[in-house]
Image (cartoon, rainbow, N blue to C red):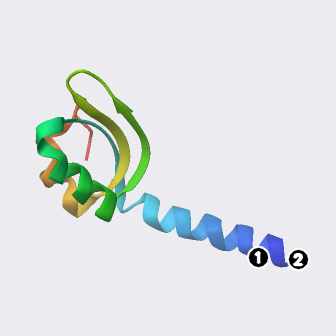
Amino acid sequence: KKNMHLDLLKTKIEEYFAGKNVDLELLIPYAEGSAITLLHEIAMVQSTEYNEVGTLIKASVPREEINKFKKYMLEETTI
C-alpha cells in the first residue's frame, strides 16, 4: 500500500512540473561551458553527448529560464 501512495505522489509531482518545464535540445559550444553549468543547476538534464562542435544536451528547462538558452536551441519549441 505504501508503494501505491509513493507512485501516486511521484505521478502528481511529475504532472505538476511537466506544465512548468519545456523539453529542449541544445547544442552548446565548448567555449561556453558556463551555460552547461547553469543548465545543470536549474534544469533536469536527460542526456549529454559530445561532438566536434560542442555539447549536445536534452533537458527539461523551466519556462521562465528558456530565454537564457534560446541561442543554443536546435529546434524551435512551441512555448
Label 1 to label 2, Cα distance in Å? 7 Å
Task: Give the crowd class for mark 1: few <14, some 14-19, many >=20 residues within 10 Å.
Answer: few
Residue type at the position of mark 1: His
Residue 2, given in percent of the width and then of the height, sits at 83, 78
Disc 1 designates what residue?
5
Please give the name of the residue rendered at 54% of the width and 63% of the height, measured from the top-left corner.
Answer: 14
Closer to us: 45 or 4: 45
Q: Is residue 32 above or below residue 39?
A: above
Q: Secondary structure at mark 2?
A: loop
Residue 27 picture quarter:
top left
Q: Is residue 55 above or below residue 59?
A: above
Closer to us: 44 or 53: 53
Residue 7 lies left or right of residue 77; in this view the side is right
Residue type at the position of mark 2: Lys
Q: Which mark is residue 62?
A: none
Disc 2 designates what residue?
1
Please give the name of the residue rendered at 25% of the width and 56% of the height, measured from the top-left corner.
Answer: 37
Residue 34 lies left or right of residue 37; in this view the side is left
* Quadrant where the image shows the N terminus: bottom right
Residue 34, given in percent of the width and then of the height, sits at 16, 53
Q: Is residue 20 above or below residue 2?
A: above
Closer to us: 9 or 71: 71
Q: Are marks 1 and 2 in contact (CB under 8 Å)?
A: yes
Q: Secondary structure at mark 1?
A: helix
Number of numbered discs present?
2
Q: Is residue 6 above or below residue 27?
A: below
Please give the name of the residue rendered at 70% of the width and 70% of the height, measured from the top-left corner.
Answer: 8
Residue 22, given in percent of the width and then of the height, sits at 34, 50
Residue 74, given in percent of the width and then of the height, sits at 23, 30
Task: Give the crowd class for mark 2: few <14, some 14-19, many >=20 residues within 10 Å.
Answer: few
